[in-house]
Amino acid sequence: MGEHADIDGLRAIIRERVWRLLVEKGEALPPFPVKGRIPNFRGAKEAAEKLAETAEWRRARTLKVNPDSPQRHVRFRALMEGKLLVMPTPRIRRGFLVLDPRLIPRDKYREASTIRGAFRYGRLLPTLAKIEEELPEIDLIVEGSVAVDHECNRLGKGEGYGDLEYAMLYLTGKAGEKTPVATTVSELQIVERIPPKPNDLPLDIVATPRRVFRCSTSHRRPKGLVLEALTPDKVREIPLLREALNKYYRR
């Protein structure tokens, strides 16, 4: 209990430091305030372009990308390149959205890359059965981050939704230990060390506006849900999570 509290405290300090630094250096972009968010940053488009230069991106036909502001450039580029885009609904409360660029007018791709537009142009998969039946295997996962380190540990906002999204895809057989996981961040979001937790989904690829670096971390991935990391509020708020617990973890 004490050890976990110490780790949580250190991780909270790192988040606060990064949010403050982005604002002080003029790197933060709307929406404001950046605190409590996956922060938007100057150079997010260039970081998306760096990610698009990787072999993993070029090979990918189906991508899962988080719905936050700095990764809108990633989502837009995926649609422009004809890739199938899978986007979690905010807090996964309504499951996942699938956006097929063949079914969206090309002049609507930019709108479709936003949360509101994704609901308009995407197909909702609200249940595990729908995910299992209708979702292809994911070729590349892109996560939003508040901070990363050079060992490809990642911090999100602190609520664990990215980890839960991966768990849903893992349990339904749509992603696994060999599915590459990437993020796009500002150089200011790279910190010396992030203490990891058992439910963390580590990264394989980090793209900034200036560079790409990689880590070999797939062996450290959680295999589905980490039950001790779940809270009653999360279980109550997310129908997909309750369904997964009943289906895969009921004794």
Image (cartoon, rainbow, N blue to C red):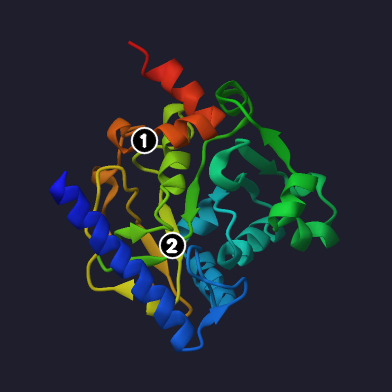
Q: Residue at x 50, y 84 (%)?
A: 27
The CA distance from mark 1 to mark 2 is 20 Å
- Residue type marked 2: Ser
Report x, y in % for residue 222.
Answer: 30, 38
* Label 2: which secondary element: loop
**Depth check, front residue: 151 or 157:** 157
Q: Is residue 32 above or below residue 129?
A: below
Rate crowding at label 2 as few (under 14), some (14 to 19) or many (20 or more) other CA atoms within 10 Å: many
Q: Residue furthest top?
A: 251
* Label 1: which secondary element: loop
- In the picture, measured across the screen, residue 159 lies left or right of residue 199, that is right
Q: Quadrant of residue 46?
A: bottom right
Report x, y in % for residue 188.
Answer: 39, 80
Q: Which residue is mark 2?
A: 145
**Depth check, front residue: 27 or 134:** 27
Point out the frontmost of discs 1 and 2. 1
Q: Is residue 200 above or below residue 9?
A: above
- Residue type marked 1: Leu
Q: Residue at x 48, y 59 (%)?
A: 144
Q: Quadrant of residue 226?
A: top left
Report x, y in % for residue 65.
Answer: 55, 52
Q: Is residue 210 above or below residue 246?
A: below
Q: Residue at x 22, y 67 (%)?
A: 193
Residue 230: which numbered mark, if any?
1
The quadrant of the picture occupied by the C terminus is top left
Report x, y in % for residue 224.
Answer: 36, 32
Q: Quadrant of residue 167?
A: top left
